[in-house]
Image: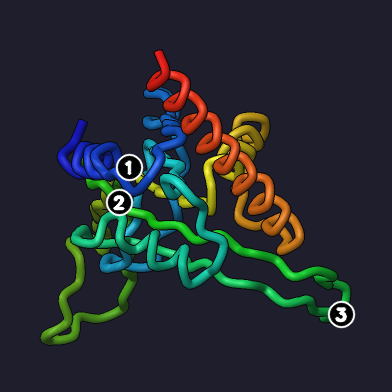
Amino acid sequence: MTEKLELIRNALKSNNNIILVDETTKTIDKKNLEEVELPPIKDKEYPFHLFCQSVSFYVAPNGLGIYTADGMNRFMHDLIPDLKLEFSGNFFIRKPYKILSASLEKDEFVFGYLQFWDNLGSVSRTYTFKRVVNINENIEGLDVFSGGKKTIEDVFVGDVIRRISIHPFPDKNIARVAIRKVSEHPYLIPDKITLEQLEQYQRNYEFEIAKEKESAKELSYLSSGL
């Protein structure tokens, strides 16, 4: 376990303002790590990466949920404020649209996310090729290979990366539904619900919280009478 993953995990577990609903890990095996097809290289300065593991944290507010995009963005960006982000996406409301064959009929509440990269090591690829130069005369100052042939080796080095993602949700019930969908379809990213669904989740969750408070009050009353 590297320091960055441990730092994020501990920060989430020790945060009393959140519920850490679940943590999942996907790792490519050793065979895939050795044989995985690397992305094409444009030039020597163009970085490439080998992603060997993805760790995802699913979190929600503790207590009452948060059902606005602005509120969820504040909640999300306060989770790990001091660590450098690699990528992030904010919560927002997507309005209905119709563009050519694509359309959206209902308002959508689009979920945000945070992503950090953990550099675990390096990966290199070596290219070997022959260059042949045929020239009819010697020109002063022109460097021609001995015999007109030269074998060239070039090494490109990239990073082996662990992706660490944090997926916040408005409440723990929405998070659990998202986690179930991911378990059924591993490559699915649950990134939105309709505003109608969000409002229904809010009503259900607030009713659930009210019932829990009422039950706790009754239990306290009964205990005090014993």
Q: Secondary structure at mark 1?
A: strand
Give me the residue at 46% from left, 42% from top: 58
Mark 2 or mark 3: whose residue is earlier in sequence: 3
> Which residue is under mark 1?
162
Q: Amino acid at mark 3?
A: Leu
- CA gap between label 2 and label 1 equals 6 Å
In the rendered image, residue 4, in percent from the top left (x then y), is placed at: 20, 44
- CA gap between label 1 and label 3 equals 39 Å
Q: Secondary structure at mark 2?
A: strand
Quadrant where the image shows the N terminus? top left
Residue 125 bears which disc, if any?
none
Left or right: where does residue 75 sit relative to residue 156?
right
Give the residue at the far top of this rendering: 226
Q: Amino acid at mark 1?
A: Arg
Corner quadrant of residue 124: top left
Mark 1 or mark 3: whose residue is earlier in sequence: 3
- The answer, for residue 123, to whether it is visible in the render is no
Give me the residue at 40% from left, 38% from top: 20
- The answer, for residue 65, to whether it is visible in the render is yes
> Which residue is under mark 3?
100
Quadrant where the image shows the C terminus? top left
> Which residue is under mark 2?
117
Q: Amino acid at mark 2?
A: Trp
Contact between labelled residues 1 and 2, with CB atoms less than 8 Å apart: yes
